[in-house]
Amino acid sequence: MSAIGVEAFGICKRFGTFQALSDVSMKVHPGSVHGLLGENGAGKSTLVKCLLGYYRADEGSLLVDSKEAVIERPADADALGLGMVYQHFTLVPSMTVAENLVMARRNVPGIIDWKSESAALEEFMRGMPFKVPLHVPTGSLAAGERQKTEIVKQLYLRRQFLVLDEPTSVLTPQEADEMLGLIRGLAHSGQLTIVIITHKLKEVAKFVDEVTVLRRGRFAGAGSVRYLGPTELTAMMIGEAHEPAEPERLGEPSDEIQLQVRDLRTAADGGRAGLSIAELTVRAREIVGIAGVSGNGQKTLVEVLGGQQPIESGSVDVGGIPYDASREQAQARHVRVLPEEPLRNGCVPNMTVVDNLALRSFDRDAAGTQRGWLDLAGMAARAREMIAAYGIRAPSPQAPIGVLSGGNVQRCVLARELDGDVKLLIVANPCFGLDVKAVAETRARIMAARNAGTAVLLISEDLDEIMELSDRIAVMHGGQVVHQMPAAGADPQEIGRHMLGHE
Amino acid sequence: MPALDSIATIAVAMLAGSLRVSTPFLFVSLGECLTEKSGRINLGNEGVLVLGAMVAYAVSFETGNPWVGVLAAAFAGMLLGGLHGVMCSLARVNDVAMGIAIMLAGTGIAFYFGKPYVQPSAPLLPGIPFGFWLESDRFRNALLVSPLFLLGVAAAFGLHWFLRTTRAGLRIRIVGDSQDAALALGLPIDRTRLLATACGSALAGIGGAFLSLCYPGSWNEGLSSGQGLMAVALVVFARWNPINCVYASLLFGAAGALGPSLQTVGFTWGYYLFYAAPYAVTLIVLIATSHGGRSLRGMPGQLSIGR
């Protein structure tokens, strides 16, 4: 097994009227770690999917191991030794690791002799840089273990060229470092070539040899990481110089407790533990960041606070009074939620931008009393103000919100949730899938709300985001808050340890 | 001791009844299990059951051989299931709505072509007398087991083995559990589901053959009482495990036998109430196995009712 290089020339790919890639070229040297960079929607995934036969490029040619290659189906890429670990895992959750590995092979026998397959797999696993349990359904593995299983699967298939799509997005900092280090070792020993799709510039600086940068479906630059620092890479990615400005933190947290959660429990679901939170408080003018590996109860916590899931026992108090997350109480106590995947969890996709912007307030008049007839003119006027203030780009205020881009949906939900007097704001992964400028804007708005006296509970899988925005950090593991610390001077390594449940 | 005697009678009648009543449940639930493992639901199996019953009876009458009737029922089921499979692989066709259409089509076709076979009597499948050594007629009758029941139990173990140790079985599970994984492996999703649906309906067709050729052993329009639909609930109860389908079918069979058994000892109070026992069991099972906001253990990930 030895590493092979891949070169792509003049790749074009169009979906309907949308030109996803135009004349993109990339050269990956054998035995190197190559970074493929770009903002969301820049065409990174489309490019590698063309390499792997998942899509067929409309134009362009490929050289694999210095030989012209035609890749029309995934099986063609498979035969050439090219493989990919997708961002959305392609393990079958109900099947064991062993079943997943064997079924990924090209030559599976009609009847599988599990005894000898298991023995062969155990033998193979001994030579692996990381261990995964063979006879456990992959659905019950933690995200980090699933990621490792995906990589082990590719090594089991004897890949010589491997693409990793955002490989560290579900890992703790230690796991990410460990995994990237091992991958880099494999590449530099000449066993395989690695392409990493990422937007984490720290990882690029530490583990990547060369990069190719895409911007809006076009080639934007390439070169050795030795000569390209974060500033240059960011400029290539967004097409202009961008100075990362940390949003300014004004004033100290007040003593007034806005959110208090005590002994909160929810029911377990299919092998996953429910929530079991002894105590969690958020004060006014304070951002409390919840760190944790995805799938450790953060989503459930947002659902409980947003009224999407019932609690079994314990109490949730807002402003010192028990809170049941009903619409009446949310309006009365000024609680707002910015959920993850806002189009799915916070919008009605087929309703217009105006309607969606009014979801919080359409049934109340200015004095807060219920109204039967809607004030359509008032709603439209309010929407126009929000669209202007938040720079929302929509074909028309009467367009269904589902047709807007992710960043603009996020701006709409942000505009709606931050409208008026907000006492408590719950935010989940607010910058997921946004481009660099939208990220900076969103974070600045959250910080501005905090500075104005809002209590903010920030749930995020991006540890950097938590470190940047929080006043205090709480770490979740297995549905529990296992550690709390002030954000100033917090050590990412220590947070990572708690994320894994180590003391 | 008349009371004790009645209890014994009821127990024997229920055992016998549950062996008989459970067989159509078993075949339809195995077929439904196979189809749902591929990520598709087939409510049309109720129609397949009725069509299978009609075809089996008609072919048995015309050829004089009930086993040919069983094969014909399986084949008819395969055709109707295949139609469901083809329709569902078209874009934007909902499998639940399509299943209801197939169910109505199946019963309609069966009633239309079955009219001339209501009167004549076709040769039935003989039972295997496991109770030949017993003196009491009652017990001997109870242990007269249909070969189709044994075939069904064998099919359950066969299907369990198939889904765990064969390439085709694992491919069906991949397609049913994770479309992403199936695409990444380059598996033909629609074709796999089509075949799983067709084969599942072939099993359901055999269940229909049992109705007309074993028990009750005649063909008329009121033959099925919704077993094809209850089998869908039964598969949920069995957690998509073929072996569990056997136990679940026996339970549903016992519930179905409750009414007739009570009648044998002259217990006539609440006659219709006890006949409704299988439906009550269906309701109780569905309520007991569903928890608000939680996913069902063992459910194939691509099933449209679960997404």
Image (cartoon, rainbow, N blue to C red):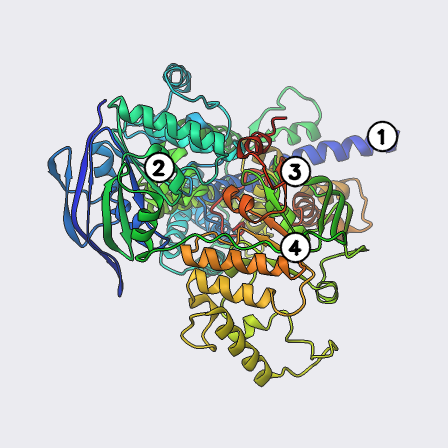
Tell me which amino acid carries mark 3: Met
Quadrant location of the C terminus of chain A in the rendered image? top right
For numbered disc 1, what is the local secondary structure? helix
Which of disc 4 and disc 3 is earlier in sequence?
4
Which of disc 2 and disc 3 is earlier in sequence?
2
Residue contact at pointers 3 and 4, CB within 8 angstroms: no
Q: Nearer the viewer, mark 2 or mark 4?
A: 4
Question: Which residue is more in the foreground, B192 or A461?
Answer: A461
- In the rendered image, which residue does mark 4 sit on? A251
Position of residue A259 in the picture relative to residue B97 (left or right): right
Q: Residue B4's mark?
A: 1
Location of residue A458 in the rendering, given as x and y in whole percent from the top left corner: 60, 50
- In the rendered image, which residue does mark 2 sit on? A205
- Whether residue A68 is visible, yes or no, is yes
To which chain does the residue with label 2 belong? A
- In the rendered image, which residue does mark 3 sit on? A485
- Marks 2 and 4, Cα distance to the nearest angstrom? 35 Å
Q: Do the residues at discs 3 and 4 belong to one chain?
A: yes
Tell me which amino acid carries mark 4: Gly
